[in-house]
Amino acid sequence: MNGKYHCLSIQKHQQRTEKAILFFFGGGMIIGPDGGDVKCAGEYGADCNMDVWFPYYPLCTRNSILETYKMVFDTYRKMVAVYGAENITLLGFSSGAALAIGVCLYNNTLDHPLPMPHRIVACSPGCCPDSNVQLNKMKELNAKDIMVDVAFMENVRTLMQHGESVPDYMLSGTLGNFKGLPDIHFWYGSDEVLYACAENFVKACKAENVTYTLNVGKGMCHCYPMVSFFPEGKSAHKEICQKICENKNIKL
């Protein structure tokens, strides 16, 4: 991408499918993808019979989140040219889920926006606390969270800014303009600090009449649908595949 960044294209039979998934890995904007992330993306592509694009977006260890958004939006632009926006699902986990939503929020800031994708699936979207109320809710959940500490969510803002002026929605997706966004399907574990953000994401959807679903795994952890060797994770993985394949004649 732009001769600087890479994007992996995953195809089941080395033949382009009609529909495709734009997959965003997680890692808090500081950890890059590993083999498990690529495997997860490949499994969604295989189970949904769709191509998958897997951008190796720049982390915020050397750049601000502005550079990240430029790269992922450029990836989306190229996918639209290949598949058409109506055939693309954005799927992300953690910070990647924030980008899945954020691509559309970024699109809404442009003078000449691209068509919106078919739908968004966001699993535990990363979000800096947008208020003291939300921060306090995170703190209440902190003792239950085995993966993400509230201190990280407080401090990652500075890292994402990297000394630059950054739009609020790139730090807290709940503060973006949701007008015209496609269906958004959220997955959270009830025992994660980011579940505190779910209420404000729902409010943002309702304010702009965006169709959404909120799926909460009771007692589950951050991004539990990725842990498909557990029954709850396996079930959530199948539910996500069904959601991606809605309006598509595929039997799972």
Image (cartoon, rainbow, N blue to C red):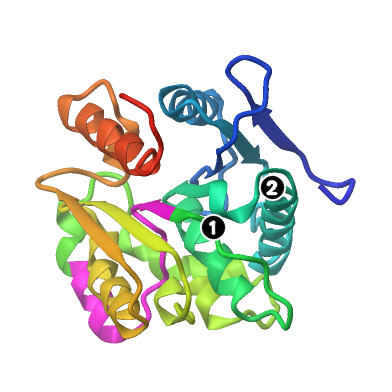
Residue 161 position within the rendered picture, expressed as x and y whole percent measured from the top left: 62, 73
Name of the residue lying farthest toward the right? 3
Residue 190 spot, x, y in % from top left:
15, 53
Above or below, 230 relative to 84: above
Q: Tell me if 185 is positioned left or right of 73 in this view.
A: left
- Identify the element where label 2 is drawn: helix
User: Label 2 amino acid?
Assistant: Met
Mark 1 lies on residue: 117
Camera-nearest residue between 214 and 139: 214
Residue 44 quadrant: top left
The residue sitting at 25% across, 52% down in the picture is 188
Give above or below for 209 relative to 32.
below
Q: Which residue is mark 2?
A: 79
Left or right? Give the position of 118 relative to 153: right
Identity, as a three-letter code, of the amino acid under mark 1:
Pro
* Residue 38 placement (x, y as % from top left): 55, 28
6 vs 62: above or below: above
User: Is residue 126 inside the magenta stretch?
Assistant: yes
Residue occupying image coordinates x 67% and y 27%: 16
Among the two numbered marks 1 and 2 on one chain, the one whose residue lies closer to the N terminus: 2
Magenta segment: 120-139
**Along the horizontal axis of the image, is 100 left or right of 66?**
left
